[in-house]
Amino acid sequence: MNEIVTIEDQTIVKPGEDVVASMADAFKGELLSAVNSSQGTLVIDLDGVSMVDSVGIGVIIAAYNSLSQSNRQLKVINVAQDIYGLFSTMRLNRRFTVEAVE
């Protein structure tokens, strides 16, 4: 179950579990609902997430594409180092903000 919090002009979505194929449909539905019901930046907080597979990345890219159509931004924060490496290798950090855990 995802936690969704709106603070000022940011909607923060915290999956709280690995973003993988088995949970992708539910996560995609909640992300698109958050995109459609909010106005500002969408923040995906990957705190506690240790794995993101190709399906999970596809869900995040779909959210980015929906946001970019209305000139809105996506930020992915608290990204584990190995997941950050994956985002960097795919050059996704050039499309949207990706912040690694310190």
Image (cartoon, helix red, strand yellow):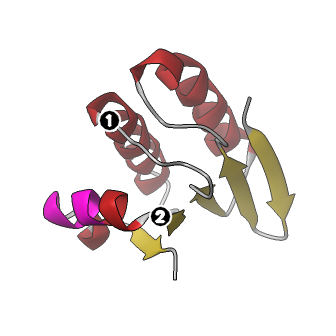
- Residue stretch rendered in magenta on the structure: 85-90
Residue 87 colored magenta? yes
Residue situated in front as seen by the camera: 16 or 33: 16
Sequence-wise first label, 1 or 2: 1
Q: CA distance from mark 1 to mark 2?
A: 14 Å
**Does the image show residue 73?**
no
Residue 89 colored magenta? yes
Rendered location of residue 42, percent (x, y): 61, 57
Rendered location of residue 72, percent (x, y): 52, 62
Q: Residue at x 74, y 29 (%)?
A: 1
Which numbered tag is attached to residue 45? Answer: none
- Mark 1 lies on a secondary structure that is loop
Q: From the viewer's perspective, is 4 left or right of 63?
A: right
The amino acid at mark 2 is Val
Decide: few, some or many residues near mark 1? Use Cα within 10 Å; few <14, some 14-19, many ≥20. Answer: some
Rendered location of residue 91, percent (x, y): 18, 64
Rendered location of residue 59, percent (x, y): 41, 34
User: Picture quarter containing residue 55?
Assistant: top left
Q: Is residue 69 above or below residue 102?
A: above
The amino acid at mark 1 is Asp
Residue carrying label 1: 53
Decide: few, some or many residues near mark 2? Use Cα within 10 Å; few <14, some 14-19, many ≥20. Answer: many
**Does the image show residue 46?**
yes
What secondary structure predominates along the stretch shown in magenta?
helix
Residue situated in front as seen by the camera: 97 or 54: 54
Residue carrying label 2: 79
Q: From the viewer's perspective, is 60 left or right of 25?
A: left
- Mark 2 lies on a secondary structure that is strand
